[in-house]
Each structure stands twice: as structure tokens, then as C-alpha cells.
Image (cartoon, rainbow, N blue to C red):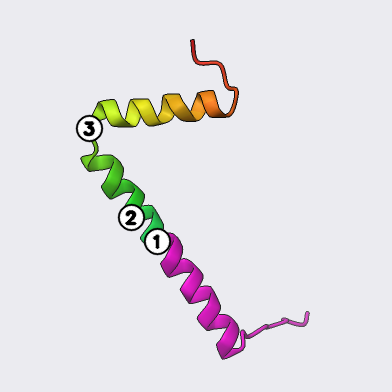
Amino acid sequence: MVAITRSLSPALAGERLNAILLAAALGIGLLFVSGFAPVVALHNAAHDWRHAHNFPCH
């Protein structure tokens, strides 16, 4: 049985790391914003999003 190993070039590894860090920063930012936002603001944002996408909410 032959094992196939692939190694990423340094440029691709750097791009992957940048993508991971960006995704982590966005995720942490969303948690931070939603954690400190007033409940009414979050409800209104979700409600407005539903109406904007023609999703029934009533």
C-alpha cells in the first residue's frame, strides 16, 4: 500500500492560516456583539431580516 502525502506550499499554508484567523475573528466578533446587545435590538434585527427575505414570522 502506497501512502500519498501532500504538502502545502508556503503560500497556500499562509492563505489557509489567514482564512482561519479571519473566520475566528468574525465568529468572536459576532459573539461579542450579540452578547452585549440589548435583547430588543437582537429581536428587531431578526424580525427585520425575516421580513426582508419574505419569511413569515407572524
| Secondary structure beneath label 2 | helix
Quarter the N terminus occupies: bottom right
Question: Residue 56 at x, y = what percent?
Answer: 56, 16
Q: Which residue is mark 1?
A: 24
Residue 53 included in the magenta stretch of the image: no
Q: Quadrant of residue 55?
A: top right
Q: Name which residue lies at 28% across and 46% down.
A: 33
Q: Which residue is mark 2?
A: 28
| Secondary structure beneath label 1 | helix
The local crowd at label 3, few if under 14, some if 14 to 19, many if 20 or more residues have their Cα within 10 Å, is: few
Q: Amino acid at mark 3?
A: Pro
Q: Mark 3 vs mark 1: which is more N-terminal?
A: 1
* In-front residue for pair 16/57: 57
Q: Name which residue lies at 37% across and 62% down.
A: 25
Judge left or right: residue 50 versus residue 9. Answer: left
In the image, which residues are magenta?
1-24
What's the CA distance linking mark 3 and mark 1? 23 Å
Q: Is residue 34 above or below residue 2?
A: above
* In-front residue for pair 2/40: 40
Q: Is residue 38 above or below residue 34?
A: above
Judge left or right: residue 15 versus residue 4. Answer: left
Q: Amino acid at mark 2?
A: Ile
Q: Mark 3 vs mark 2: which is more N-terminal?
A: 2
In the image, which is nearer the foreground, mark 3 or mark 2? 3
In the image, which is nearer the foreground, mark 3 or mark 1? 3
Task: Look at the numbered discs 3 and 2 and tell me whether their residues touch, using CB distance below 8 Å.
Answer: no
Q: Which residue is mark 3?
A: 38
Q: Amino acid at mark 1?
A: Ala
Task: Look at the numbered discs 1 and 2 and tell me whether their residues touch, using CB distance below 8 Å.
Answer: yes
The local crowd at label 2, few if under 14, some if 14 to 19, many if 20 or more residues have their Cα within 10 Å, is: few
Q: Main secondary structure of the magenta part?
A: helix
